[in-house]
Amino acid sequence: MNPYFSAPPDAVIVVGAGLAGLLSAYLLEQQGQSVLLIESRDRIGGRVLSDAAHTSAPFVDLGPSWVWPGINERLSHWSATLGLKLFPQHQRGAAVMEMQNHDVRRNESTYAQEPPSQRWEGGAVALLNALTARLERTQMLFNAQATLIRHESENAVAVIVDGPQGQQEWRGSSVIITLPPRLLAERIRWEPELPTSLTTQWQRSPTWMAGQAKLVASYKAPFWREAGLSGHGASQAGPLVEIHDASDASGQSAALFGFVGIPAPWRAKMGETELIQRSLQQLARLFGPQAAQPQWVHLKDWAQDPHTATPADALPVNSHPTQPPRKLPAPWDGLVYLAGSEFADDFNGYLEGAARSAEMVLQEWRAEALC
């Protein structure tokens, strides 16, 4: 192990730089706290991934993209507070439905999401970028995997991290962990150990969307709109089962995205090249031959992302996750807090849940700090 490293004596260590982790860091700073933010990836965002590597146009989302202002109270609040702009998901035009025999049917009255969904200008990552830009007392450590949490005393916790410089040990006054429950159970050891009954329940808690894959195809123009199509499609044949318009607010950055309906083990056997080829053939059936000639295609298979999914997440999930147990026994209570979308008390798995979980944990942390 490398020499002992120390964050400021009163620092709170936050594990995970997704929305819950970044918002936790921001709220801690509002309380005058110093923060050490540990992230296993080389980027912020977690399951939020907005890509613009192939185009100078605005970002397209390879993870979550929608916000429902009518019901996402906390996302609405933070979007307004951070000065972010939203625009409506494009839904004007006809929808298409592909049957199992590849017969395509056109429905002039397209399916409209209710309540209406919106998207962030600049992609969902705009929310995380805005939070990051406001952090002043937070030190970020990327490519760093937290592997062990050790109880030091009543007022200190040590976190062992495997990172670019080898193994390091950081000490803080408390720790907020924002990992999904399965990753938390499989990747982090505890000294003293947690009850097996608790970690077993975490292992049984699916990580929402971790077994899914999303394909985005970008074009010079939204040609489907000229044909009176909304860009929405559904298919009983696949490989894409649900498709939407992913263009930017102006429609100048044109794109379609689809959720892949093939289970993760089959995707792995098929391979990325064949899956993309079949998906483009399908888009051509649904929206015309131009759809087979995108400027670029990006396929993100979250089941293959070790920072998101475990092997158990490759299995289909038939129901929305419910809140797993998040209260820790002594000596961890009051020192280590669990946040993250799956640990939210409502909107589990959604970005709204991630925001709510961060605010909930900060209330608990403040109550403990005042004791």
Image (cartoon, helix red, strand yellow):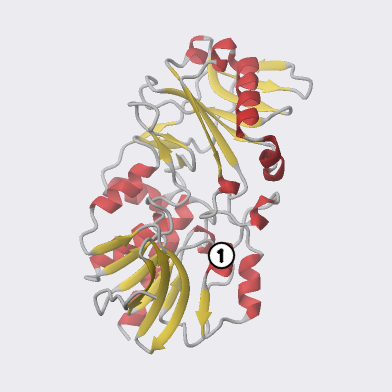
- Judging depth in this view, the residue of 225 and 212 nearest the camera is 212
Amino acid type of the residue that numbered disc 1 sits on in the rendered structure: Pro
Residue at mark 1:
181
Residue 172 x %, y %? 33, 77
Please, what secondary structure does the residue beneath circle 1 have?
helix
> Which quarter of the figure is the C terminus placed in?
bottom left
Residue 327 at least partly seen: no
Q: Quadrant of the N terminus?
A: bottom left
Query: In the rendering, at what x and y percent does residue 112 appear?
Result: 55, 29
Quadrant in the picture for residue 159: bottom left
Measuring 46% from the left and 42% from the top, which residue is drawn there?
Answer: 68
Location of residue 73 with respect to 94 vertically, above or below = below
Q: Toward the viewer: 322 or 190?
A: 190
Q: Nearer the viewer, residue 53 or 194?
A: 53
The vertical placement of 2 against 268, above or below, is below
Q: Residue at x 48, y 35 (%)?
A: 116
Of all residues, the one furthest to the right in this rendering is 101
Q: How many marks?
A: 1
Q: In the visual, does 89 lie left or right of 126? A: right
Q: Nearer the viewer, residue 108 or 286?
A: 286
Residue 167 on image: x %, y %: 40, 70
